[in-house]
Each structure stands twice: as structure tokens, then as C-alpha cells.
Image: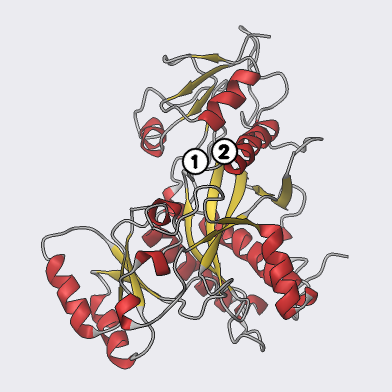
Amino acid sequence: MPPVKYRIDCEKYAVISNFEKRGWQRTSGNDWNIYWAPVAVVQRMFTIGSKSRPTDTQIVNHFPNHYELTRKDLIVRNMRKYRRDLEAKNSIFCRPDPETGESYIDFMPLTYLLPSESTMFAEELKGNKKTPFILKPAGSAQGRGIELISRMAQFKKWQASQANSRTIYLASRYINRPLLVGNKKFDIRMYVLVTSYSPLKAYIYQHAFCRFCTVEYSLDPGDLSNPFVHLTNVAVQKHGEAYNSRHGGKWDIDNLKLYISAHYGYEAVNKCFEKILFTLIHSLKAVQSSMVFSKSSFECYGYDILIDERLHPWLLEVNASPSLTCSTDADRLMKCKLLDDVLKIIIPRNFPPSEGSSNNARRTVNVEDVDDTGDFHLLIDEFKNPNAANEGWVYCPGALLNK
């Protein structure tokens, strides 16, 4: 069998070390079998008339239009449409939970797209005197361009600053009563591996972690502009005076489960994390019909989830290129293991095919079950059960349960 050739346009240790330990050979040409490519490169591969479209022996790390999920304005539009479809079917997932008042499908905060929905947002601000809104550029990451506002005067000032800009922004209701640990705000980074959208097949990585702010939480007007209070991104927090480079302001997800169990009870942990799994699955379902089929694509997404004090999860954003930079020793070990487990799942047997052999298979990325998925667990498999997204939700009264 010929050696696997890989291409990568950056020096990411977690990726390269996993390729090298398998004896794969690096190439800078077009003779690669697996390409760890930037999102823009993958988008160009799949444009009409492209001469660099992947062949039957090539695998690439993004779907052609991944941005339907990972661009902030598009996931909002897709979720709006998905919710309308569920409401039209009188779905049980649209009915409010008596404990929180939020339905299962309410996992994204109220959001306005700017500038197209500026008038509606202005009306919302006039009638809302307490809850801040967070403004984010639709296409940015790592906390860049984010502002918190709560008054019409702030919005007008912001509008004036954007007069000559074509950037699309989101104005999302700020989750102002988050679950706190040590009086500090945090969010959860979770990894989801998708090997197919049609049908949907995805895995969840067990080693999620919490990312903490370095300054105690406060909604005082003077603190709304302090990113070390409100933005959990490591790219922001690492510049704070209280940042601890030894642990990187991170906490293993098992510690969070123990904390919630101690304060809310074991059953509350199960219900909260069922809602998180629901959020992951149905965000993928919301974009499923929009995703271009690609036999050569897989994607490992970085999901950012916030839990409020009622233990209701909120989807903040989905990252197509979650950071693989290793800020601590524990971070390096986790991310190297993550990539190792991704490759265990997505690389098919006898890959690449021998020279001269024909590969008429419908897919290049492996979608079959594998014996060793490492620390990934199967999240959903519509190959085996087309109705999987609707079944098995123990804490959603009226939902179908697996027998």
C-alpha cells in the first residue's frame, strides 16, 4: 500500500505529530491524501470550475460550506428557519420547560442581525431597561470587535462608528445570570466530529473543558467594558494580570459536573447535559439541509456553550477551526489525543487505494463504525436510525424514548 501523504499550511504540533507518528510523508504539492487546510482554501477547492477539487484518494478537514454552522449570522438564520419548521409540526421541543421557562429548542439567545434589523433592535432597547446586549462581528473570532451595551445612547454611538462599514454584526441578549464558580464566569468548549451530514453522523469528545474569566463577575455599568469580567476567550484572558499560565484558566468538565451535583443534585447534572447534547445535535440538524455533500470532507468543530444559573445551556458559537495551540502541558496532551482519535475515525481501511485501483465508493472519509474511537463517543448516527435526533430525550416530557 502506498504511503499516506499529508499537507498542512501551518506548524501545528498537535496535527503534525499525529501525522508523523503514523509514518505519513509531508508534501507541499497536490499529491496529498489528507490536507489540514485553512477554511478559505477548502472553500476555493469546491468553487465551480475549480481544478483543485479533492479526488477519490483525498480527504480534507472542512465541509465546502461549513460557514452555514460556523458563521454567526448564518447559524442564526438557519436556527430561525429550523425552529419555524418544528413549530409547524407542533414539536414537543418547542414547548417550555416548566422549571426554566425555556424550551429545548431555545438554546440560542434572542439575536438581531445588524444593520438589517437595527430598527427592531432599537425598539427592543427602548423597552428593555435592564438586560445588556452583546454586539459581535459575524465573521470574527477570539473576542475581537465585541461590545456590551444596554442603552439607546450607546447603540446610536456604535451606529455612528459603523457608518462606513459593511460588516454584519449580531446583537444578542446577554446571558446576565450565568452559572458562576468562585464568582467567576465561564463557558464550556466541546469538540464535535462530523463525518457525514447526509445522513448525519457525529461524535462528541469526552474531554470538554471550562474556560474561566480572571476577574469576578459583575454587571455594574463600570464593568461592562471589562473583557476580563465578561469574555472567556483564552485569547483575551491570557493578557489579564490574574491569568495563570500553569492551568490556563481551564477546568475539566468532570470537575464542573461534580460542582453542579454538589449544589443542584445529581439529577440536575443529567438534565443539564442532556440539554447540551440536544443543543449539539439540533444545531447540526438546523444546517443539515444546507450542507453541500462532499465524500472527501470531515470536520471537528469547537462548540462554545454557556450554562445559566437555572442550568439551561446556551449556544454561543461554533468554531470551524478551534484553536490547536497548546497553552499548557495538559492542553498539549489533550489536543494531541483529540487529533489522534479524529484520525482513528475518519481514515478508512486500506487508505489510500493502491495505484491503478479504482475507488468508486460513494465516500472517501470513513463513515463505517470503528472498533476504537478513542475518547470520542457516538453522538448521532442517522445511517442506522434516521429518526435518531427525536428519540431518547428522557427529561423532555412527551419526546420519544428509545426502547
Question: Residue drawn 66% across and 58% down?
Answer: 253
Q: Secondary structure at mark 2?
A: loop
Q: Residue 107's image quarter?
A: bottom right
Residue under the point 72% across and 79% down: 264
Nearest the eye: 1 or 178: 178
Can you see residue 335? yes
Q: Quadrant of the C terminus?
A: bottom right
Q: Amino acid at mark 1?
A: Phe
Residue 347 vs 104, above or below: the answer is above
Question: Does label 1 or label 2 sit earlier along the sequence?
Answer: 1
Q: Nearer the viewer, residue 368 or 28?
A: 28
Q: Secondary structure at mark 1?
A: loop
Q: Amino acid at mark 2?
A: Phe
Q: Is residue 267 left or right of residue 78?
A: right
Instruction: Give how far across and how far down residue 50 sits, in percent.
Output: 36, 27
Separation of disc 1 and disc 2 at Cα? 6 Å
The image's mark for residue 260 is: none
Residue matched to label 2: 298
Q: With respect to residue 146, does 90 lie above or below?
A: below
Give the left or right position of residue 223, taking residue 193 as reference.
left
Contact check, label 1 and label 2, Cβ < 8 Å: yes
Q: Residue 150 appears at what percent x and percent y?
A: 30, 82
Quadrant assignment for the N terminus: top right
Check the image and report above or below for 225 versus 283. Answer: below
The quarter of the displayed image where residue 209 is located: bottom right
The circle on residue 63 is 1
Residue 144 appears left or right of 63: left
What is the tally of numbered marks visible in this picture? 2
Q: Position of residue 272 (x, y in %)?
A: 68, 72
User: Dot 1, how many residues are within 10 Å of its Cα: few (below 14), some (14-19), or many (20+)?
Assistant: many
Residue 40 location (% of width, % of height) = 36, 37
Give the residue displayed 42% in from the left and 50% down from the top: 67
